[in-house]
Image (spheres, helix red, strand yellow):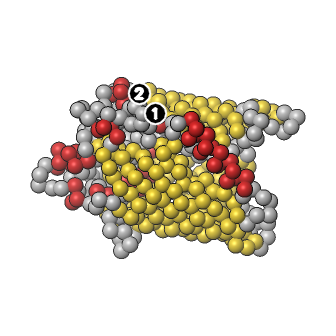
Amino acid sequence: MKKLLLVFFLFLVICGTLTAKENSKFSFVFADLDQHPEILDGFLPTLLEVGMDYNLFKLSEDEITKIRFTLGGGYTQRQIYQHPLTGKPLDDHILIYDVIQVLWDLRFSQTFINNIMLNLGYKGRWEKPVDSLLLSGGGIPKPSSIARKRGISGETDVVSIDDWFKNEMGDEVSKESTPIYPDFHEESNVFNILYTEFVYNKMKDTGVINDGYLVKLKIETALPFINKNACYLGASLNAVASKTLYEIHSNSNKNLFSIVLIDRVNISYGYGSAFPTFAQSSYSLGRKVRGFNSRSYNTNFSMVNNLDIRFSGPEFPIKQIFPRLNVFLDIGYGTGNYFNTGYNTKEVKGNNFLASSGIQIEMDFFDMFDLGIEFAYLLSGKNVKNPSKNFQVGATFFLDF
């Protein structure tokens, strides 16, 4: 397994090196990375998406036209937290299952003067839901410590996809007709999404320091005439501001230590008659407040503030590899209807105000991903998957912003 990780990191280094020539029209793109929490406790990447940028032409140093293509796939875990008939949030008996995925993305980008960028793109994905690894006694090579502490096994609270839907809906309605989870209407699905992004970037980012601000507005849609089981429209606004408080370099201009204060505000709204679970990850309140679960607290509207203090350095002999300690405080609020239903937050007992605080201990690799561990204490709200615990531990691959 260590050899596999080494090969993975060397692959990224080689791709970045081969495309780093100053006058090259091609450049390497690292698009996505994800993990399965039951495979080596989530510390082994099980999904990867990479690709290339190609500069079509350059009118000036600030006006560049380019296209991007990325391709990837992998094997990850998901949980869903709404009743398949009513859409009411579930406090227990959630469905835990796995997904085989293939991902692709084609994007046209135009940069303008004054650090403005416009992106127009198409992304697609093929997905096949399968029963959880936990049904066969755990992951590879063994169940995670979190799973063992919860007592998860094939005999307790993890069942097959078919059995879960049958238990929740009875014999009268099948999983192929659930109004809440259109992802399960077919054995596998192909989703096609169109999107546009407007980016205003005044952020100086070297990995170890961040100064300035960045604003991104994204709108995406899955149209029903090209998606059999998806129909939705989503919009999100992401604004980040940062200030380097302290920095010290070596004689060779490598970072020895830096302290950065960074704050993000994220506001999103999603609406549609068939909002698939993969898309809910980007809009659910639980995904944005650290320590909670993706697709939990999945309401139409959510807004979150993430505040970080990052302590970085020193850089290793290879530049842009360094340790980082990140201290965070997250506060978020969600309201409106739950996805794919008219079930409103006003009808649910509980609190859609979430807050958490904690630390992330990580190694940063080339400002592309951060491999580490996260310790989060839940100040308000509960982690639905582990409702009895206010303290959550998990693997991290990315800083959230």
Density class for disc 2 (Cα within 10 Å; few <14, some 14-19, many ≥20) is few
**In screen coordinates, is 32 left or right of 13?**
left
Instruction: Tell me which residue sits at (21%, 52%) in the image.
Output: 85
Look at the image and tell me whether residue 280 can be seen.
no
Q: Is residue 132 left or right of residue 206?
A: left
Q: Residue flagged by tag 1: what amino acid is it?
A: Asp
Residue 130, percent from left and from top: 32, 49
Q: Is residue 54 visible?
A: yes
Q: Horizontal and vertical percent for residue 171?
A: 11, 52
Name the spot of residue 164 as percent of width and height, x first. Answer: 22, 45
Between the C-alphas of marks 1 and 2, the distance is: 7 Å
Tell me the quarter of the picture where residue 133 sits: top left
Against 119, residue 216 (above or below) is above
Please determine whether, in this image, residue 350 is positioned above or below residue 302: above
Label 2's element? helix
Residue 187 shown left or right of residue 291 in the figure: left
Tell me if 328 is positioned left or right of 293 in this view: right
Q: Which residue is mark 2?
A: 145
